[in-house]
Amino acid sequence: MNYPEFPAPAERTAVIDLAAIRHNVRHLSHVVSPARVMAVVKADAYGHGAVETARAAVSAGAAWLGVAHISEALALRTAGITEPVLAWLHTREAEFGEAIRANVDLGVSGWDLEEVVAAARELEMPARVHLKIDTGLGRNGCPEDLWEAFVGRALAYQEEGLLRVVGIFSHFAVADEPHRPETDEQLQKFRDAVAVAEDAGVDREVRHIANTPGALSRPDAHFDLVRIGLGMYGLSPFAGQTSAELGLRPAMTVKTTIAACKEVPADQGVSYGLHYRTQEPTTLALIPLGYADGIPRVATGGPVQVDGQVYPVVGRVAMDQMVIDLRRTGIAGTPDSLVGREAVLFGGEGQPSVDEWASAAGSINYEIISRIGGRVPRTYIDSEPRGGAGDTEGLPIALEAAPESTTAPEGATDPETHAAQAVEAP
Ligand SMILES: *Cc1c(COP(=O)(O)O)cnc(C)c1O
């Protein structure tokens, strides 16, 4: 699929604005200060590119990185990223030894403690572990009734020099619904678990429980560190609040161009199943993105913006393509002249939102961005190439070839304006 010796302009792309990621990290760091931010870059940074996102986040002040799998952590190390990284989801096949060697922190909940210790013993290198307590989510995490014994085992291994207990953590279940009482219960259980560990002699560096919704809605959940995923990508975790209302900027724009366009009579069926029929003579435009690219098959009605106007997808989303009905909108041009016109599925201000796609698909914004597929090349831009106010460093990636004239004012998010700076993902 990749022919690097023949680079072509992207026919479809997910444009990632690194300045938006930095802005969001700075904003969230301010909200949670003096707690620090762990930038969660699992699942290829929710589709944004783990290495590029991690570098941008660190340059904006993120002190830690977080991933689910050890393999994701090792990929960051291979890219030369040296900040603390925590990986928290393991199987019996997990490469604990590689993680220890690469100085990757390991979240442990039960059986994994023993495997981590076995790997540390073999390597004669201490592991860095974060003990996880299940405060109510019911996934991993040590059950409350086993916690004291678990902590005791970890301390015994620490005495032996096989590990260091760096952190104590847990994960929220309903923080995106701030009125629900379970979050209070989880917080109380977490405080109790921390107290048990400290009484037993644990001298941890960090306590952490909050994800993005917890960080934004519960100042009493910040502790020493918050684990931020969605908010760093500029999206809102709350049903009733937009990104803009939270001071966040969406970092990903997914766009392509119209691949075909034609006039059709009334009663023209559209796409598999013929669930849509034109009501009157109209113009249909073909959008070359489909469910193989991560656009959910059920997302009929999802918004596509052409020339500033938004058209809903009509008929089924197919594997590679979907159709919009240009109707009576008076879009200028003959069908042939509309071929090649830019079509934006979602992006920042003034463009359709990820949330509209989530609602068309009966899903959440997390799923829409993280499933944008490998057939959609990522393109990185920097709408504030000199660094916005408060930037702690300059550019996270080399864009110094960007001409002066493309420098954007603070707040500019239109990626088109900065196309000259676009760099293709490797
Ligand atoms: C994915 C994940 C996060 C990040 O959650 P957001 O709501 O995206 O901020 C934090 N902690 C854990 C354990 C996770 O799995």
Image (tube, rainbow, N blue to C red):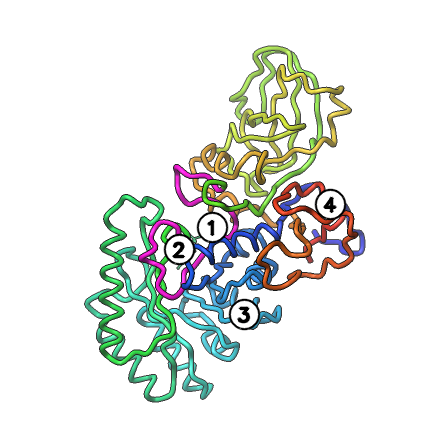
Distance of label 2 from label 1 (alpha carbons)? 9 Å
At label 2, counting other C-alpha atoms closer than 10 Å, the crowd grade (few under 14, some 14-19, many 20 or more) is many
Which residue matches tag 2?
211
Q: Closest to the observer: 423 or 256?
A: 423
Distance of label 4 from label 3 (alpha carbons)? 32 Å
- Nearer mark to the viewer, of 2 and 3: 2
Marks 4 and 3 close (CB-CB < 8 Å): no
- Residue, x 57% and y 58% (percent of image)? 390
Which residue matches tag 4?
419
Marks 2 and 3 close (CB-CB < 8 Å): no
Which residue matches tag 1?
230
Nearest to N terminus: mark 4 or mark 3: 3
Secondary structure, mark 3, is helix
Nearest to N terminus: mark 4 or mark 1: 1
Distance of label 4 from label 2 (alpha carbons)? 33 Å
* Quadrant of the frame with the C terminus: bottom right
Which residue type does callout 4 highlight? Ala
Q: Is residue 69 above or below residue 249?
A: below
- Nearer mark to the viewer, of 4 and 3: 4
At label 3, counting other C-alpha atoms closer than 10 Å, the crowd grade (few under 14, some 14-19, many 20 or more) is many
| 377 in the magenta segment | no
- Ligand 1 has an atom within 8 Å of the beta carbon of the residue at disc 1: yes
